Image: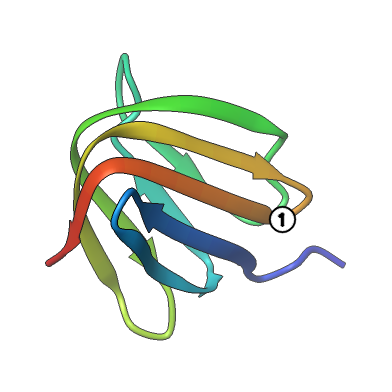
């Protein structure tokens, strides 16, 4: 049975921004936006300036400026150069 959520950690140079379970994450990837869902294939993407959206118990939005997102085995780590919750 497919998972309904995956573990997400969002951090910046200043420290952790958010950690929890999400059902979907949209990131501003270089070359265009990218959406991650449970069971997504392993990926490593570079981030551009833009808005990142996390669908969790509560929908979250972050303004980011560069960094990367890594997804593997229903775990996602997002490290941003500059990021703030909106």
View extreme (right): residue = 1
Can you give x and y, in whole percent of width and height, for residue 62 in the image?
22, 57
Badge 1: residue crowd in 10 Å (few <14, some 14–19, many ≥20):
many
Please give the name of the residue rendered at 71% of the width and 34% of the height, measured from the top-left corner. Answer: 42
Quadrant that contains the C terminus: bottom left
For mark 1, what is the residue? 74
User: In the rendered image, which quarter is residue 18 located in?
Assistant: bottom left
Q: Is residue 79 above or below residue 9?
A: above
Residue 74 at x, y percent in the picture: 71, 55
Task: Tell me which corner region of the image, top left, top right, bottom left or bottom right, holds residue 64.
Answer: top left
The residue depicted at 44 percent of the width and 42 percent of the height is: 35
The structure residue drawn at horizontal position 66% and vertical position 71%, both measured from the top left corner, is 4
Question: Taking 65 as reference, is 22 left or right?
Answer: right
The relative height of residue 21 versus residue 76 in the rendered view (above or below) is: below
Q: Picture coordinates of residue 55 (x, y %)?
A: 39, 68
User: Looking at the image, which is closer to me, 66 or 30?
Assistant: 66
Judged left or right of residue 77, residue 50 is: left
Residue reaching furthest to the left = 86
Element under label 1?
loop
Q: Report the number of discs.
A: 1
Q: On the picture, is 29 further left or further right than 84?
A: right
Tell me, what colour scheme is on the image? rainbow
- Left or right? Give the position of 80 relative to 42: left
41 versus 12 height, above or below:
above
Q: Quadrant of residue 43?
A: top right
Q: Quadrant of the N terminus?
A: bottom right
For the point 49% across and 38% down, which residue is it?
Answer: 69
Residue sitting farthest toward the front: 14
Q: Nearer the viewer, residue 28 or 66?
A: 66
The extreme bottom residue here reads 57
């Amino acid at each position: 049975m497919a998972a309904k959520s995956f573990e997400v950690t969002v951090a910046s140079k200043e420290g952790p921004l958010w950690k929890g379970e999400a059902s979907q994450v949209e990131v501003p990837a270089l070359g265009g936006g990218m959406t991650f869902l449970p069971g997504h294939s392993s990926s490593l993407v570079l981030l551009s300036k833009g808005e990142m959206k996390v669908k969790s118990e509560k929908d979250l939005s972050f303004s980011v400026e560069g960094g990367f997102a890594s997804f593997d085995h229903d775990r996602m780590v997002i490290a941003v150069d500059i990021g703030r919750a909106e």
